[in-house]
Image: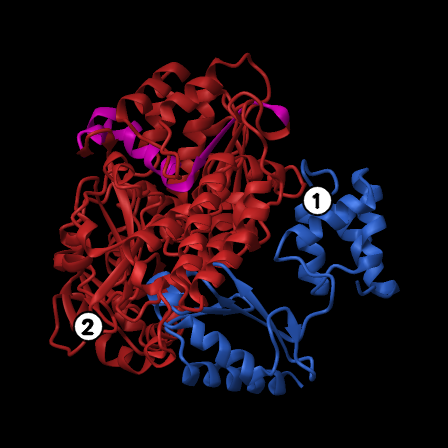
Amino acid sequence: MAATNEQGLLQIASIIEQHQTLPGAMLPILHAIQDNLSFIPSNALPLIAKALNVSRAEVHGVISFYHHFRSEKPGTHVIEVCRGESCQAMGSRVLEENIKQRLAIDYHQTSKDSQYTLEPVYCLGNCACSPAIRIGDDIHGELDQQKFEQILESLNTYSLELK
Amino acid sequence: MNLSPSTENSMALMSRKIFVSLDTTARSKGSDKVATQAENILNSQPDLEAKLVRNGSRGMFWLEPLLEVNTPKGRVAYGPVKPEDVSEIINQQCFNDIVEHPLCLGFTEELPWFKSQQRLTFARVGIIDPIDVDDYINHGGFVGLTSALKKTAQQIVDEVKESGLRGRGGAAFPTGIKWQTVLDEPEQQKYIVCNADEGDSGTFADRMLMEGDPLVLIEGMIIAGLSVGANQGYIYLRSEYPQAQRILNLAIENAQAKGYLGENICGSKHSFHLEVRLGAGAYICGEETSLLESLEGKRGLVRAKPPLPAIEGLFGQPTVVNNVISLASVPYILSHGGASYRDFGMGRSRGTLPIQLAGNIAQGGLVELAFGISLNELLQQYGKGCKSKRPMRSVQVGGPLGAYLPEEQWHTALDYEEFASIGAVLGHGGIVVFDDTVDMAAQARFAMEFCEVESCGKCTPCRIGSVRGVEVIDKIIKNDNNEQIRQDNVNLLHDLCDTMEYGSLCAMGGMTPFPVRSALKYFPDDFLPQPSTEKAQ
């Protein structure tokens, strides 16, 4: 598990303080940390454990149980590919392989240039327009290889604009 | 408030509206760009005095992005619209009547696909501005709540019992009975939990409803709170639905500002607080006891029942756990009466079912109809066959744990008992269509693989059975033409399915055998060794 620096820890402490009085605060805290830091650093665990009065093992158990939470910093763009039956009926098995080849990574991996992290997801609820992927909060439907290339291109253009 | 004639006149003009959906699927097809274009045109032509409304979706997803214009005769639909089409459509004439345009589809509600539906729960979805409380009220919103506020808790529960409403999850348990159990618990902290963890592939009814008419769910939850004496509700929403999360939170905020949530709702002595909680990508948290564990901040491990959540639920307190559609059906029941809802449907399946057509289907989307329509009618009349234009071969109903049905079973009526009688489930009403290129052995293998990935791990039949299931199916598929070995492995797979079905703690392991067994039974040839060239086709 990767750790974070002093500044990250201050952010985490503030998040914990804001949420810890909620009943069942664990998931809201973990979501807020991941939303802010893009992952849940290892040195956040003792802070969460202390605030919620549980063991570090319990915190680790929760993080590792849920597919959404991650302990390593992901690439700039997290690409989630839907593996649901509806997407399979529209050719997602082939698409998945093509995406893996195109990005030269497998599921749960990050590309060498730290641009892309690839994750499987089980249903984005876009089943009437399968196959689907999600990047950030954007869901793309009726996907094929050509459309995927266009999306990659737009992502790269976007990151250049930011600079 | 007194309005001057000029203000009234301008209000009448301001009722000119252009509708472009903010539904996830519409957005995935580019509706945001269409909306931006429409907005730009309206801003640059103030004389049109029209405004853009981001509505939910009508559920005709092959026509999205759909642009609608309200006219005195009804809404006119144009679609599927690209941003460059918008300027041709919007002009003074478009607000008066149907105009000649290649993308014009006529009056939305006259489209045969839409017109023939029986929309009770989805009555407002695609029509109103989802987060506008006044728009909701103008379309019959909060009538159910007003009626509930005049009743005793028992009278509300009796109304729901009379409606025959059953939970839209796998078990189809009567909602009224569940509420009665919670109501009968002594006075203490009680909770209403909405299970918005719609994880089944092929289902999107909850998402559409939460994005298109979140206030109906909120109203249903408030009524549930009144009926059992609960003042706190949680919507446990899957993290895969970011748009639904945004819209629900805005709707809750607006409902609170208008006095429908919080302390002393609508000036009564009742209070109800509501919060959206996000899941984190675990399919098992759609199982009610796992969901409660997750809400409490733990791993989503299944709890053994009893005790029922109705008696010991969230934080050990009596809890109503209902699906989105169950709760969203309640306002109709309270405003029109339980009997009115019960009069739709067949047998013991009362009311309507939002059906989702997905997968390889030409016209995918949501159809709300009374129980009883046959699968065939849905696939042909509404779905219009496969998107690939190839013959349909297999249909999976009720999510990844539902059976794969061959053509000879497509005459089955959509009814919980009819489906149970053929070893299938209706579940959440999701229908996924496959054409004749499907490899059913691969689909059976995937069912076991899915269980392996998503099992909570608490019970052995599910945790270990799914791993062994993948292995045995691999052996069957790869067998070396030795019929005896093949048959032994098929028998082993049946044994394993028995163990999972009868030994698992919940439906995850208990129902994974459904897709596996149905694939083996109805598509046995796919499990035979095949020449690699043939398989590749």
Q: Position of residue B503 (x, y in %)?
A: 51, 35
Q: Position of residue A109 (x, y in %)?
A: 65, 73
Residue type of the residue flagged with mark 2: Gln
> B421 or B276: which is nearer to us?
B421
The residue that disc 1 covers is: A26
> Does B507 appear above or below A65?
above
Mark drawn on residue B97: none
**Tag 1 subunit:** A
Residue type of the residue flagged with mark 1: Met
The residue that disc 2 covers is: B92
Colour chosen for chain A: blue
CA separation in Å, label 1 and label 2: 54 Å
Neighbour tally class for label 2: few under 14, some 14-19, many 20 plus, Cα within 10 Å: few
For the question of whether residue B399 can be seen, the reply is no
Asked if the magenta segment contains residue B501, the reply would be: no
- Assign a secondary structure to mark 1: helix
**Tag 2 subunit:** B
**Disc 1 or disc 2, which is closer to the eye?**
1
Q: Magenta span: helix, strand or loop, mainly?
A: helix
Give yes or no for contact between labels 1 and 2 (Cβ–Cβ under 8 Å): no
Q: Which residues are drawn in magenta? A: B316-344
Q: Position of residue B373 (x, y in %)?
A: 17, 45
Occupied quadrant, residue B390: bottom left
Colour chosen for chain B: red
